[in-house]
């Protein structure tokens, strides 16, 4: 049974990663390519952009490459993007499956969608409230500081959602709200200056499209996983 569950999680993760790659190629990648034309340019007077850091669903980019290797534009870049998205999809699928099994959560298409929404809130939406998705050429705080804050926000949001959704005690629910809010009360690391040559309309479109892509990924992943595990459960009872 465990082997079939893990195999189902693997297939669901691959499918969600491939779908996210297609949506990214349609709605996100063109904005990255457009912004790369402004990378290294002097910021226009009075132009401002939000602080940026990527959500962890496959949209992460490091723009200060220096002499570091990076895939070439075209097939190589697309192939590495798809590969990273599939790996992320499988990893998140396994994490959701582990949470379902350890916590004894109900499995169905509907419950899977709700679990996907929770994953989106913890991994994408909550971190983006402090560190919005970043285009090439946009200012950002130190990478380590952003990573520490991002991981802390993901962990706190996931824990808070768990307390709110799974524990009946009102004090536990109140503690969950506080835990979710804590990283934002501390505040995300900010760059020394916000001026950027990247046009504001590109930055806003990129942030919105990146979050929309992440939402599609998580909801589809949750739905696929919930439906697949429910079907396996039915077959086990029938046997």
Image: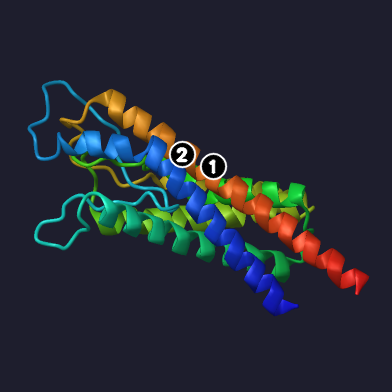
Q: In this orientation, does residue 57 appear?
A: yes
Q: Is residue 47 left or right of residue 217?
A: left
Q: Is residue 83 left or right of residue 72?
A: right
At horizontal 46% and vertical 60% (from top left) the residue drawn is 86
At horizontal 64% and vertical 72% (from top left) the residue drawn is 6
Q: In this orientation, does residue 180 appear?
A: no
Name the residue beneath numbered marker 1: 215
Residue 211, numbered circle: 2
- Give percent across and percent down for residue 27: 40, 35
Which color mode does the image show?
Answer: rainbow
Q: Is residue 208 left or right of residue 215?
A: left
- Give percent across and percent down for residue 132: 37, 39
Label 2: which secondary element: helix
- Give percent across and percent down for residue 35: 22, 35
**Cβ–Cβ below 8 Å for labels 2 and 1?**
yes
Q: In the rendered view of the protein, which quadrant contains the N terminus?
A: bottom right
- Give percent across and percent down for residue 76: 26, 57
Label 1: which secondary element: helix
Residue lying furthest front: 75
Q: Mark 1 packing: few (<14 Cα in 10 Å), some, or many (20+)?
A: many
Above or below, comparing residue 84 to residue 178 in the picture: below
């Amino acid at each position: 049974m465990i082997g079939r569950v893990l195999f189902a999680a693997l297939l669901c993760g691959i499918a969600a990663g491939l779908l996210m790659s297609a949506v990214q190629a349609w709605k996100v990648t063109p904005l990255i390519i457009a912004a790369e034309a402004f990378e290294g340019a002097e910021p226009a007077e009075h132009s401002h952009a939000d602080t940026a850091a990527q959500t962890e669903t496959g949209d992460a980019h490091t723009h200060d490459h220096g002499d570091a290797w990076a895939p070439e534009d075209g097939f190589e870049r697309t192939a590495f993007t798809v590969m990273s998205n599939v790996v992320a999809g499988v990893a998140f699928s396994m994490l959701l499956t582990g949470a379902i099994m350890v916590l004894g959560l109900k499995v169905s298409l509907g419950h899977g969608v709700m679990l996907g929404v929770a994953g989106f809130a913890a991994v994408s939406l909550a971190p983006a409230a402090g560190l919005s998705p970043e285009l090439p050429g946009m200012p950002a705080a130190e990478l380590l500081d952003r990573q520490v804050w991002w991981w802390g926000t993901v962990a706190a949001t996931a824990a808070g959602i768990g307390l709110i959704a799974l524990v009946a005690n009102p004090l536990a629910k109140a503690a969950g709200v506080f835990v979710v809010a804590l990283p934002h009360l501390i505040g995300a690391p900010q760059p020394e200056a916000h001026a950027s040559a990247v046009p504001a309309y590109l930055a806003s479109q990129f942030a919105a499209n990146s979050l929309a892509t992440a939402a599609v990924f998580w909801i589809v992943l949750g739905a696929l996983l919930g439906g697949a595990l429910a079907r396996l459960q039915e077959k086990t009872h029938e046997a």
